Amino acid sequence: MDFQILYAIQGWHNDILNQIVLFCTTLSGSYGQLWPAIGVVLCFFKKTRKCGFSILLAYVLGLIIGQVALKNLIARPRPCQIDPSVPLLVDRPTSFSCPSTHTLFAFSSAMAIFQFDKKAGLAAFVFAAFLGFTRLYLFVHFPSDVLFGAVLGIACGVIAVKSVDALSKKWRFLS
């Protein structure tokens, strides 16, 4: 079923959507660097400092759990590695497929943002969902990789916010 969904999405390719998807993928960064960059900026302002640290912690959790541990443990090949006949708009990735860490980083950050600002968090979730879609559109992840990345990302975001909240009671600079 994963491939049926991916092949159907390949039929949606057009010049405009290609450019939008490539822009969002580039904006996000090869390792989701957009999110820690936002986190660092938010750390400079007292009002958003806890949110910024939560995003940074969520990113680190996602990096360790998703990129370092689970990708290598699950070792699932990417769809573009299984079916190399589908033309790609990006360089062929060499890492494993599951979970989608682009999606994980986006959802963990969106969850952290949502905990502090519902309106900005909803916008971040919409962007995170679109980033998840880009992984399918680009034929570099299976739908189940993206879903797993989203769920794991939400969990990392919740853990990060709760951890930063607990630490803020001990470390004054977080308050």
Image: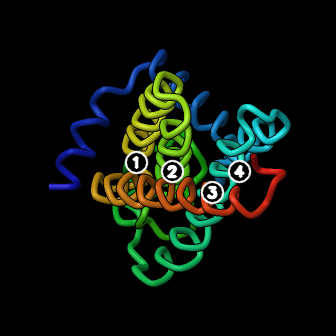
- Residue type indicated by callout 2: Ser
Q: Looking at the rendering, in which quadrant would you find the N terminus? A: bottom left
Q: In 3D space, how far apart are the residues under numbered discs 1 and 3 (Cα atoms)?
A: 24 Å
Q: Which of the two discs, 4 and 2, sits closer to the camera?
A: 4
- Residue type indicated by callout 1: Phe
Q: Closer to the camera, 139 or 105?
A: 105
Question: Residue 48 has which mark?
Answer: none
Q: In 3D space, how far apart are the residues under numbered discs 4 and 1 (Cα atoms)?
A: 33 Å
Residue bearing the label numbered 1? 139
Residue bearing the label numbered 2? 108
Sequence-wise first label, 3 or 4: 4
Q: Residue furthest left?
A: 1
- Residue type indicated by callout 4: Phe
Q: Closer to the camera, 122 or 94?
A: 122
Q: Position of residue 51 (x, y in %)?
A: 65, 42
Please report contact status of discs 3 and 2: CB closer than 8 Å, yes or no.
yes
Q: In 3D space, how far apart are the residues under numbered discs 4 and 2 (Cα atoms)?
A: 12 Å
Q: Which of the two discs, 3 and 4, sits closer to the camera?
A: 4
Residue bearing the label numbered 4? 53
Q: Alpha-carbon neighbours of circle 1 within 10 Å: few (<14), some, or many (≥20)? A: many
Please report contact status of discs 1 and 3: CB closer than 8 Å, yes or no.
no
Q: In 3D space, how far apart are the residues under numbered discs 3 and 2 (Cα atoms)?
A: 7 Å
Question: Residue 59 has which mark?
Answer: 3
Q: Which of the two discs, 1 and 2, sits closer to the camera?
A: 2
Q: Secondary structure at mark 2?
A: helix
